[in-house]
């Protein structure tokens, strides 16, 4: 993976785990401190980060291919990630040691992290433009 893609995926992963801490605090406030919530949050955040890294790796690999081969590669990557996510959900549902919702909610965190990164980049670029005009 190219260095910038790796850095961006690492930033998203950091935000995912930060959101996981916020989720854990919220679950603990409403349900009490339980080990299944800790395990579910860690399981969900780890899977979400691994899934995002695999997406970044797949996109990077398809950039250097012809259009048709890149489409085939991305379709295969999508199917693999979808099957792994389904397996992750089944494991979260079957094991009592994993709080189901604490594990499932972090699957939404990478998308939220990307939106937050874009939002803060827009805010900082507007602030920089304002200071240049002064």
Image (cartoon, rainbow, N blue to C red):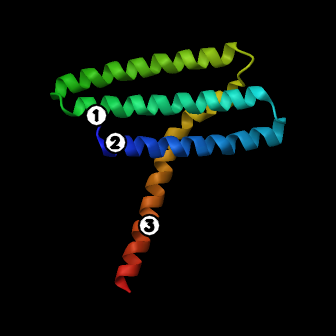
Residue at image coords 52%, 44%: 14
Residue at image coords 37%, 40%: 6
Give the mark, 2 or 1, whose residue is nearer the N terminus: 2
Mark 3–mark 2 Cα distance, whole angstroms, equals: 21 Å
Q: Residue furthest left?
A: 66
Q: Residue furthest front?
A: 3
Q: Quadrant of residue 107 in the image?
A: top right
Q: Secondary structure at mark 2?
A: helix
Residue at image coords 55%, 39%: 109
From what the image shows, is residue 81 above or below residue 32? above
| Residue beneath disc 2 | 5
* Circle 3 residues within 10 Å: few <14, some 14–19, many ≥20: few
The circle on residue 104 is none
Closer to the eye: label 3 or 2: 2
| Residue beneath disc 1 | 60
x, y (%) of residue 42? 63, 31
* Circle 2 residues within 10 Å: few <14, some 14–19, many ≥20: some
Mark 2–mark 1 Cα distance, whole angstroms, equals: 8 Å
Most foreground residue, 19 or 126: 19
Mark 1–mark 3 Cα distance, whole angstroms, equals: 27 Å
Give the mark, 1 or 3, whose residue is nearer the N terminus: 1
| Residue beneath disc 3 | 124
Residue at image coords 15%, 28%: 66
x, y (%) of residue 103? 64, 28
Q: Secondary structure at mark 3?
A: helix
Contact between marks 2 and 1 (CB within 8 A): the answer is yes
Q: Secondary structure at mark 1?
A: helix
């Amino acid at each position: 993976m190219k260095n910038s893609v790796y850095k961006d995926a690492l930033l998203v992963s950091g935000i995912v785990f930060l959101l996981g801490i916020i989720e854990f605090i919220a679950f603990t406030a409403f349900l009490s401190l339980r080990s299944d919530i800790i395990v579910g949050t860690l399981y969900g955040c780890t899977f979400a980060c691994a899934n995002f890294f695999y997406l970044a790796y797949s996109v990077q690999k398809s950039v250097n291919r012809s259009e048709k081969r890149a489409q085939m590669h991305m379709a295969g990557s999508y199917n693999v990630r979808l099957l792994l996510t389904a397996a992750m959900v089944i494991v979260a549902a079957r094991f009592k040691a994993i709080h189901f919702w604490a594990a499932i909610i972090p699957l939404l965190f990478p998308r939220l992290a990307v939106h937050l990164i874009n939002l803060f980049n827009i805010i900082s670029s507007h602030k920089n433009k304002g200071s240049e005009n002064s």
